[in-house]
Image (cartoon, rainbow, N blue to C red):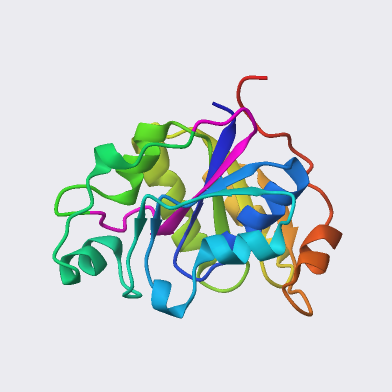
Amino acid sequence: MRGVFVTGTDTDVGKTMVAAWLAQHWQADYWKPIQTGSTQGTDFDSVARLAPAARIHPSAVVLPAPLSPHEAARREKTRIDLSALVPPVTHRPLVVEGAGGIMVPINEVALMIDLMERLALPAVVVARSGLGTINHTLMTLEMLRRRRVPLLGVVMNGQLNPANRQAIEHFGGVRVLAEIQPLPAVTAATVAGLPPPTFSCPGES
C-alpha cells in the first residue's frame, strides 16, 4: 500500500490541512479512521473542501463528542475495536489522518500509535513552529522509533523558526519535509497554491 499516516504532536496543529495538501498534490485518497467531535464538523468534510482532487473514504468510526476516541466512544456506550479499522482498498496513494497525537487512547488498551504500527505506513509528523515544539516533537519521534513505526519526516506549521527547525533535525535525526507559513485563509485555492511536496508518496509503485 502506498501512502502516509499524518499524525501530530498535539491536537489542532494543522494535521487536516497537511493531509489535504498531500492528498491534493498527490491526487490521493483520504481516510480518517476515527472522527470525533462530529457535532462541530468533520475533518473529512474539510479535506473534501480543501482538496477537490482527493477521493474521500468514510471514517470507520464517527463520534459526536469532541473528546479523545476512548472517551467519546464511552459516552456513546460503545467501544472502538482496533481490528475493525481496516483501510480502504485503493490503487491510488492513501493519506491517513489520525485523531490527536500518537498517545491518544482508542480504547482501554490501545493507543493511536498501536493503529499506526498496525497499518505500517510511514508517518508524517505535523508540528507547530513556535515555543514548545522541540520537546513535543522529539518525544513524538522517540515513541515512533521505539515502536518501529516508519518515519518519513516532519512538517512544521507557523511562522518560520530556523532555530527550532535546526534543533528538531539535529536532535531528532529527522528531515523537516516542509514549513507551511500561516495562510490568509485556509481554502482550496490557498492549499492548491502551496508549493508541492518535495518528496514523493512512499510505497509500492
Q: What residue is shown at x 75% (from left), y 71% (from top)?
A: 187
Residue 136 image-quadrant placement:
bottom left
Going by the image, does 100 lie left or right of 45? Answer: left
Q: Position of residue 195 (x, y in %)?
A: 84, 54
Q: Is residue 164 above or below residue 85?
A: below
Look at the image and say whether residue 102 sits in the magenta stretch. Answer: yes
Q: Position of residue 147 (x, y in %)?
A: 34, 35
Q: What residue is shown at x 43% (from left), y 31% (from top)?
A: 120
Residue 14 in view, yes or no:
no
The C terminus lies in quadrant:
top right
Q: Is residue 39 above or below residue 178?
A: below
What range is drawn magenta here?
A: 89-106
Q: Nearer the viewer, residue 100 or 169?
A: 100
Q: Position of residue 189 (x, y in %)?
A: 83, 67
Q: Residue furthest top?
A: 205
Going by the image, does 106 lie left or right of 169? Answer: left
